[in-house]
């Protein structure tokens, strides 16, 4: 074991102990964060308009700061782009992080000097937690690959702008630079498919031990790697590959296909990064949720998802949440986002320390008939069906079919199989039964003959990749939406 790996083990123990001290007193930890945020924000244009100097705690924060999504912040962001200082946070942002918008094109999220350590430190904490839990630091002695956006930045006004992963790529710690792949030149290739081929060429002969990225894009990398080398499994090409780090989507639907490509199981660590801040990471075994980052520049609120948008919706602090309730996540950050509706929903699986699972998006659901099916339910139903009828799913999405040529309406599942099930109809019924078990409203619609059981439409191999590319979503951060309440996402998918 190298000195670097030994040092990492020692650092991991110390860091995990410090993190857990903060996590075991969540209310006090969050109150301290809130006070720092208020001190930073009260003299800004936003702070003066909303009277942040008069906020002392959660109740007064709720009274003075309304909830907003990006559209509510757009006028403030435009002032920043025009060069105005001290708008949402003192000074001007270091970066404007470009991310996809669902209603009005691109969004530009500020990253400040104060908030940058949150983005960088979150992934570091996750790896150190893994080392502390498993004692495995061997990946530190090999190469690591990060499938991410281009580090070459544009400008929005006078401020550098790019994808979050591309911004973070410009701040890789010095001690990781020799281990990190791909090269800057390869990472800067704008076309994703060309970039993946170049990454394969750079990495196929390296001692690669850690791979990080969205599962769908890592899957593409593995497929291209095997096609180039002629090998049957990734382990034959990369025998020391031992840790997969991912975020942005649930890994469960991809696991079977990924492990088939790899040639067996590898450890995985789940992250919850967002352009607005690094929110949580897996610090325990699989299925035990992700530890909420409480002490690094973000103050959280939680709105019961069924109340979102109502004038009397409850806005709860970390000390008021309950297990198993679906909450819309609200952020106040040291990038100057105040009462920001990030668009994700979460449930707590532990309160002390606070650990969460991501259940879906506030805008991504299927409820054409009042069933309000969410991502957690469709992903869980698919996983259950795959356990009873072996197959490999490359990608999928769900949309309602309101006007079929004949018969009752239904949920249409568009699935791209790497290895299809032996009986597609039986597989569809397995998913439908599992979904009814998870969502009683959906079950009532089926048993009441309002809907008929779901229908699977097979998507040809490579269909999702082509579909995303046609929509300008062909990069390392883009994800297929799991659900929609209309058919705009599935038009042209075949």
Image (spheres, rainbow, N blue to C red):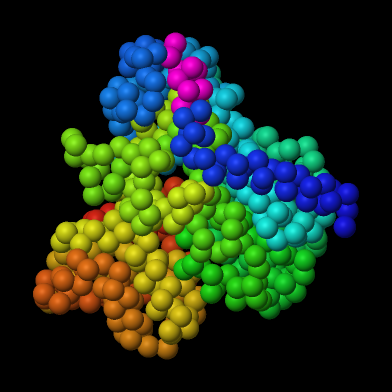
Residue range highlighted in magenta: 33-44
Q: Can residue 32 be seen here? A: yes
Can you name the residue that lies furthest to the bottom here?
A: 422
Q: Identify the residue at image location x=88%, y=49%.
A: 3
Does the image show residue 190?
A: no
Query: Residue at 43% across / 85% down in the picture?
Result: 389
Depicted 138 relative to depicted 173: above or below: below
Quarter of the figure that contains the C terminus: bottom left
Q: Position of residue 200 (x, y in %)?
A: 70, 59
Q: Residue at x 28, y 73 (%)?
A: 437
Q: Nearer the viewer, residue 23 or 465?
A: 23
80 relative position to 115: left or right: left
Question: Is residue 164 shown above or below 205?
Answer: above
Q: Quadrant of residue 94?
A: top right
User: Image quarter for residue 415?
Assistant: bottom left
Does the magenta-highlighted stretch encompass residue 40? Answer: yes
Q: Quadrant of residue 323?
A: bottom left
270 in relation to 426, above or below: above
Q: Position of residue 75 (x, y in %)?
A: 34, 21
Please report the residue visible at 31 percent of the width from the left and 31 percent of the height from the top.
68
Q: Main secondary structure of the magenta part?
A: helix
Q: Quadrant of the N terminus?
A: bottom right
Q: Position of residue 41 (x, y in %)?
A: 45, 18
In the shown orientation, is residue 298 left or right of residue 45? right
**Seen in the image, is 120 located left or right of residue 248?**
right
> Between residues 148 and 281, which one lies in front from this camera angle?
281
């Amino acid at each position: 074991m190298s000195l670097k790996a030994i040092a990492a083990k020692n650092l991991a123990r110390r860091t995990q102990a410090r993190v857990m001290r903060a996590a075991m007193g969540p209310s006090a930890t969050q109150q301290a964060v809130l006070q720092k945020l208020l001190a930073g924000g009260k003299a800004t244009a936003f702070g003066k308009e909303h009277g942040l100097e008069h906020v002392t705690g959660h109740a007064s924060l709720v009274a003075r700061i309304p909830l907003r999504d990006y559209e509510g912040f757009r006028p403030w962001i435009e002032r920043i782009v025009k060069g105005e200082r001290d708008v949402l946070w003192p000074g001007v942002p270091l970066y404007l992080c470009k991310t996809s918008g669902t209603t009005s094109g691109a969004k530009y999220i500020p990253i400040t000097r104060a908030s940058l350590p949150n983005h960088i430190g979150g992934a570091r904490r996750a790896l150190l937690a893994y080392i502390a839990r498993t004692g495995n630091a061997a990946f530190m002695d090999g190469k690591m690959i990060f499938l991410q956006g281009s580090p070459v930045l544009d400008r929005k006004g006078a401020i550098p702008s790019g994808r979050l992963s591309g911004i973070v790529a410009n701040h890789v710690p010095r001690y990781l630079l020799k281990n990190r792949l791909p090269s800057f030149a390869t990472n800067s290739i704008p076309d994703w498919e060309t970039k993946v081929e170049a990454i394969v060429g750079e990495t196929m002969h390296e001692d690669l031990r850690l791979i990080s990225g969205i599962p769908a894009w890592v899957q593409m990398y593995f497929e291209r790697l095997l096609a180039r080398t002629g090998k049957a499994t990734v382990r034959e090409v990369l025998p020391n590959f031992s840790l997969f780090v991912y975020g942005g989507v649930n890994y469960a639907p991809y696991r079977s296909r990924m492990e088939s490509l790899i040639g067996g199981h590898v450890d995985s660590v789940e992250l919850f990064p967002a352009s607005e801040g690094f929110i949580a990471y897996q610090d325990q075994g699989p299925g035990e949720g992700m530890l909420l980052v409480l002490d690094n520049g973000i103050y959280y609120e939680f709105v019961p998802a069924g109340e979102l948008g109502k004038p009397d919706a409850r806005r709860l602090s970390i000390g008021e949440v309950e297990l198993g309730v679906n909450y819309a996540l609200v952020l106040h950050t040291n990038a100057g986002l105040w009462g920001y509706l990030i668009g994700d929903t979460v449930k707590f699986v532990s309160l002390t320390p606070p650990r969460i699972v991501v259940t879906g998006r506030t805008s991504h659901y299927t409820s054409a008939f009042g069933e309000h099916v969410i991502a957690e339910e469709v992903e869980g139903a698919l996983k259950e069906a795959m356990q009873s009828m072996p197959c490999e799913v490359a990608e999928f999405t769900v949309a309602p079919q309101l006007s079929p040529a004949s018969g009752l309406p239904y949920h249409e599942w568009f699935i791209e199989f790497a290895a299809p099930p032996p009986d597609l109809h039986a597989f569809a019924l397995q998913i439908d039964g599992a979904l009814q078990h998870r969502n009683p409203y959906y079950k009532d619609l089926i048993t009441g003959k309002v809907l008929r059981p779901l229908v699977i439409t097979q998507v040809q191999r490579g269909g999702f990749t082509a579909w995303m590319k046609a929509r300008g979503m062909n990069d390392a951060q883009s994800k297929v939406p799991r659900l929609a309440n209309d058919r705009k996402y599935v038009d042209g998918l075949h």
